[in-house]
Image (tube, helix red, strand yellow):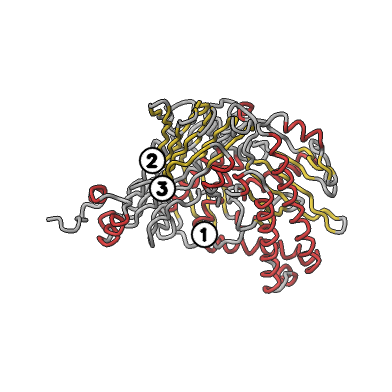
Amino acid sequence: MSTAAQENEPDPLTLAVIEAGLRQVCNEMDIAFSRAAFSPVIAEADDRADGIYAPDDGRLISQGELGLPVFVGTMQQSTRDLIRLIAEGRAGRPEPGDIYIVNDPYLGGTHLMDVRFARPFYYQGEHVCWLQNTGHWPDVGGMVPGGFSAHATEVEQEGLRLPPVKLFKRGVLDAEILAIIQSNIRVAEQRIGDIKAQAAALLVGDKRLTALIDRHTLPVMRRAWAALEDRADARMRAYIATIPDGRYESEAFVDSDGVVNEPLRITLSVTKTGGTLSFDFTGSSPPCRGPMNSVSATTISAVYLAVRHIFPDTPLNAGAFRPLTITGIAGTFLDARYPRPVSGCAAEVSQRIAEAVFLALARAIPDRVTAAPAGTSGNFCLGGVDPRTGAGYVMYQITGGGYGGNANHDGLSNGCSTIGISKTAPVEVMEQKFPVLFRHVSIHHASGGAGEMRGGFGVHYEIELLAGEARASFVMDHGRYGPPGIAGGQAGAVNVVRIHRGGKTLIPEHLSKDQDIVIRAGDRVEVMTPGGGGYGNPAARTVSAISRDVARGTYTAQEAQARWPHWQPEGAP
């Protein structure tokens, strides 16, 4: 930073106050969104994020601590694409009170269910920045309820695709565009609640950001934004400098694409030079037929979130990403182009990308990196009509899994997915809103990978349909291979899906990907999510730690002895 720039920079105390204020604006948007939303996936599971973006190039100014990390990079790219389309005359020019809606995955998106709203922010008549949020809608049409089509071969089969259009014009909801949306999605009458909640969150952000600028003045705020980016850049480079220079390689695998029952390979080479990290995905599998392609914005965002997992204290703005470069995705399934299907990109492929980053950097800084986490969002959708009320429904269930062990402690059990803070909605809420009964909810027994520090445990649940007929779909992963351990640790248990109907048990051909499975009252769906990988040589685990796990019932004595042969049950000869 030049001397002149430093002289114009606000004092450290003011910078800290502004940084916290920006974060608070985003946090309040997140909270308002969740509290006002109708759908449990937003209201209870918090599958959403809000942020502030620059008016000229869409770079991230701030995002709150309560939003999904995977949306950090995607919403930045989405804002850039919106700005570009406006400049090209392919989207209407912004005016105060406008809100654009877009879910096109090829325009800085993820999958179609992640719907983005963007509102231009004006201060005293000047367009100062953009406010944007993303919310996971339970349904956007397509082949199956919930949008997670495991067998889609083109994006049109996954649902309604929207380019940036003004859903709100000068603060007024456009009834014609709303009618188009509602005519193409299931349970359309319930979406208006989520739409108004999503718009209201941006209005909260508008009011809070106005008050923050009133307090500090616009010139001071702009200087602060620039200074905060520079400081985030410097902080990230300082963290990267602790990594030894060199080239570190890894690979990770997606079970299948849902159509062709063969693994997809992610090949990664990370090169560290000075204060920069380069991520090269050359050699990864080509574009696939099924919905496990990843758009470039999601791929890039997955790298960002993986690095933030390793260095979580880095400030959250565009400056933190300057030292990171991503190459080698062109011509692979990590750079999906129209009309490739993408429903699994954000929830599943992004987690394999993050896993590859963890595995590569574990070779360089094993004390800072965990073994692989469960790495799946456990996407399960159930749609039908409840005969007791005559109302249609789409239930979307996400689940946690085990985190990987690390140098200091065992992995967390039932942790949220790698890509975010989303959590399973409370059982009581799901049973109240949908015709289901949770017959079983527990940890996934013995699912943590063995190591000096074992992996955390996944989740085991079983849902029974109580009335009528429904269609079930799954897009999950790690059913073929468990999350790998590092430094000698063993892999965690794989994902398991079973459908119990008519006295028989069905296991999907693709293990944890299938769609349009008809289930009737009394049929049950059983899911066991993966455990985390183990860290370190299992022979180094203390006998007391193993005995504690056995006493808690998370492993039987026989299971513990198979994983840690140096341990003997009390009283054994």
- The residue that appears at 73% across and 72% down in the rendered structure is 7
Q: Is residue 74 left or right of residue 533?
A: right
On-image quarter of the C terminus: bottom left
Which circle's residue, 2 or 3, is located before the other in the chain? 3
Determine whether 542 is above or below 199 in the image. Answer: below
Q: Is residue 486 left or right of residue 331?
A: left
Label 2 amino acid? Val
Q: Quadrant of residue 469?
A: top right
Marks 2,3: beta carbons within 8 A: no
On-image quarter of the N terminus: bottom right
Name the residue tied to disc 2. 494
Q: Viewer-nearest of labels 2 and 3?
A: 3
Crowding at mark 3 (Cα within 10 Å: few <14, some 14-19, many 20+): few
Q: Nearer the viewer, residue 573 or 115?
A: 573
Crowding at mark 2 (Cα within 10 Å: few <14, some 14-19, many 20+): many
Name the residue tied to disc 3. 442
Q: Secondary structure at mark 1?
A: loop
Which circle's residue, 1 or 3, is located before the other in the chain? 1
Label 3 amino acid? Ser
Percent position of residue 335, x then y = 58, 36
Q: Residue 397, which numbered label?
A: none
Q: Nearer the viewer, residue 257 or 15?
A: 257
Q: Secondary structure at mark 2?
A: loop
Q: Viewer-nearest of labels 1 and 2?
A: 2
Crowding at mark 1 (Cα within 10 Å: few <14, some 14-19, many 20+): some
Q: Is residue 288 visible?
A: no
CA gap between label 1 and label 2 equals: 28 Å
Percent position of residue 57, x then y = 73, 49
Name the residue tied to disc 1. 311
CA gap between label 2 and label 3 equals: 16 Å
